[in-house]
Image (cartoon, helix red, strand yellow):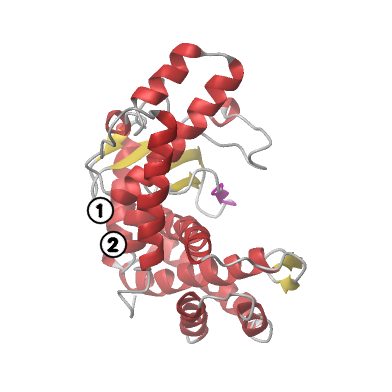
Amino acid sequence: MDNPGLFNFPPINRLHRDRTGKIHTILSPDAQPRPSGLGPAADYCLAHHALEGAEAAARSGEQATFDWYTANPHADAAASSAPTALGPRVVVAPDLITLPRSPISETPYYVLGPGSEPAPIALRTLAADAFATAAETGFGNLLASHAVVAVLLRTKQLGETLDSWTITRLPGTVFLDHVADPVVLARDLIHEAGHNWLNDALTASGCKIDDQAAFPSPWKQSMRPAFGFLHACWSFPLTMLYTARALEHTDGAVRRFLAAHLDQQRVQLASTIANHPRALELVSDEALRERLAAVHRQALTL
């Protein structure tokens, strides 16, 4: 990235520390906070897994599981972590069919727990190479704090539709299909980590986006609430900036795939030029608004 401080947003750092402390107090009111050693952003992410798991166990009356979460506020992340250029990352590959669906999310999701196991070594290596690729192209800070847990889903062939998502109740966690190429996986890690970053930034800065405002989205080909429109106008440009850098070091089928992605995104982003400034007016925090505008503006130059 041309602006290495882009993702360093101090309100997010405060949010991570404060929210983690509150969750640990809820889980174990009489215990002293115990940092995981992975850093505040990782503790924040893992605390949400522990809280979600404990709530589900309490609702279903699973006392042993509830006790496990209260005793493991970091969800025993070390058991599923893999070394990467950004430090340990939790990489798991659960069976998509077994993932729960509930009112907390429109998509399937996964919560670390006593039965969690690390992904097979080949997938951990793929993820580690993807994290390294993202770091080399200037997105290390983003992924270090907002892609702590990578849930790898379906294995697909290059050119097939790759689904990926995040859910707000599990910040720092990303859910991704994947192909056998770290450059492509890095693109999707950046996209989803971008969503996590913006969710945290809006919360940390106290920005409340008007849910009545809507804008035409070229990605959804429909009118979208301002919240979703702003998310798309942030995360897709991030993948464009990454892709432009990655193309310098790829060839063959992967290069053609990424070049086609960039061509498609240029057209789609161009159609947001008139509406993006209007949507940005709904972001009350000036520093955040400037970051969103800068990324959109930079991607338009590609």
Image quadrant containing the N terminus: bottom left
Residue 103 visible in the picture: yes
Residue annotated with mark 1: 86
Q: Judging from the image, what secondary structure is the residue with disc 2 in?
A: helix
- Asked if residue 183 shows in the view, the reply is no
| Category of crowding for the residue at label 1, using alpha-carbon neighbours closer than 10 angstroms: few (below 14), some (14–19), many (at least 20) | some
> Where is residue 172 shown, x and y percent of the image?
43, 49
Tell me the magenta residue range: 161-167
Give the SS element for disc 1: loop
Residue in the foreground of this view, choosing between 124 and 214: 214
Residue at image coords 64%, 32%: 101
**At 26% across and 48% down in the image, what residue appears?**
39
Q: Nearer the viewer, residue 142 or 38?
A: 38
- Total numbered badges shown on the rendered structure: 2
Q: Position of residue 237 (x, y in %)?
A: 51, 72
What kind of secondary structure does the magenta stretch mostly adopt? Answer: loop
What residue appears at the point 35 percent right and 55 percent down from the top-left corner?
145
Amino acid at the residue labelled 2: Ala
The verdict on residue 34 being magenta is no
Q: Is residue 69 above or below residue 294?
A: above
Instruction: Spot the residue most to the front.
Output: 30
Compared to 67, does 168 lie above or below? below
The disc labelled 1 sits on which kind of residue?
Leu
Do callouts 2 and 1 mark residues in contact (Cβ within 8 Å)? yes
Q: In the rendered image, which residue does mark 2 sit on?
A: 135
| Label 2, label 1: how far apart the Cα atoms are | 8 Å
